[in-house]
């Protein structure tokens, strides 16, 4: 019963947590976390490097101490002071033990430093890969959001939205245009267009006759002026012109 209760509680809170999780925000936080680990890693590598440098300096001091003690022992022996040489000999033995211990520690420190550099190299490569994947996923998420908005817009077009209103307005305009065109045809059919054409042609003929009449009157006036100016022997042609005008 207790295990079932624990499982139920986990399922309850697990569902709540899952509903609260935003993959985009989590990926962005993962990128920040990966970048934040670099300073801590550099600090750890610096600590390993400092330990290595300290052991290298200690090994050099031990090596110098061994060299100094060896020279002192030789000098004491040459001075026939074996008692002093014996004291230096014990110090030399301890210095050699310390030097060997320091060399062992130095070997481990060098390996640890090389291992730390390798770990950092692998971490940086893996970090760059994960960040690149995260950025690509974020870009894909942005594209998906944009596509989702476009899909929503298209669905609104199809379901009682712009598309329906658009088609309805176009249909209404086309119906109105067709209705007006039909009214125009009916209005034209109700008018006697043939009679209008006959009247228009009659007006043209009347206008043409008026123009011809003006021409004849202008010709008559010009003929009377020429009779007054010319001799009497030319009266016959003038009369003939008059008779032609009468005809």
Image: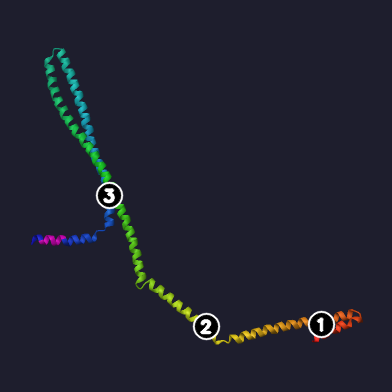
Q: Residue 204: x percent and y percent?
A: 68, 82
**What's the distance in space between the residues labelled 3 and 1, CA to CA?**
113 Å
How crowded is the residue under tag 2: few (<14 C-alpha within 10 Å), some, or many (20+)? Answer: few
Q: Residue 155: x percent and y percent?
A: 34, 69
The numbered mark, 1 or 2, whose residue comes first in the sequence reads 2
Q: Is residue 214 left or right of residue 74?
A: right
Disc on res. 104: none
Residue holding disc 3 = 130
Secondary element type, mark 1: helix
Quadrant location, the C terminus = bottom right
Question: Which of the 4 quarters of the picture holds residue 225?
Answer: bottom right
Residue holding disc 1 = 220
Q: In this view, does 98 lie to the left or right of 155?
A: left
Mark closer to the observer (3, 1): 1
Majority secondary structure of magenta residues: helix
Please state the extent of the stretch shown in magenta in the rendering. Answer: 4-10
Q: Is residue 91 left or right of residue 32?
A: left
Residue 35 visible somewhere in the drawing: no
Residue holding disc 2 = 185
The numbered mark, 3 or 2, whose residue comes first in the sequence reads 3
Q: Are marks 3 and 2 in contact (CB under 8 Å)?
A: no
Which residue is pictured at 17% across the width and 19% down the height?
A: 70
Seen from the viewer's position, the closer of residues 95 and 153 is 153
Q: Is residue 151 above or below residue 86?
A: below
Q: Is residue 226 left or right of residue 164?
A: right
Q: Residue 19: x percent and y percent?
A: 23, 61
């Amino acid at each position: 019963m207790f295990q079932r209760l624990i499982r139920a509680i986990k399922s309850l809170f697990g569902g709540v947590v899952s509903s609260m999780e935003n993959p985009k925000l989590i990926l962005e936080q993962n990128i920040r976390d990966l970048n934040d680990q670099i300073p801590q890693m550099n600090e750890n590598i610096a600590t390993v490097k400092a330990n290595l440098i300290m052991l290298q300096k200690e090994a050099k001091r031990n090596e110098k101490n061994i060299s100094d003690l060896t020279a002192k022992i030789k000098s004491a022996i040459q001075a026939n002071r074996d008692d002093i040489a014996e004291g230096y000999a014990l110090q030399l033995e301890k210095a050699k033990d310390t030097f060997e211990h320091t060399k062992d520690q130095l070997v481990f420190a060098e390996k640890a430093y090389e291992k730390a550099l390798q770990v950092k190299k692998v971490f940086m490569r893996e970090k760059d890969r994960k960040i690149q994947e995260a950025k690509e996923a974020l870009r894909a998420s942005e594209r998906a959001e944009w596509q989702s908005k476009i899909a929503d817009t298209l669905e609104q077009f199809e379901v009682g939205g712009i598309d329906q209103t658009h088609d309805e307005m176009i249909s209404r305009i086309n119906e109105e245009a067709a209705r007006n065109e039909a009214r125009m045809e009916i209005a034209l059919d109700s008018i006697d267009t043939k009679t209008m054409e006959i009247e228009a042609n009659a007006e043209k003929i009347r206008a043409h006759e008026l123009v011809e009449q003006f021409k004849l009157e202008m010709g008559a006036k010009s003929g009377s002026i020429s009779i007054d100016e010319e001799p009497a022997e030319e009266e016959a042609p003038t009369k003939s012109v008059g008779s032609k005008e009468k005809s």
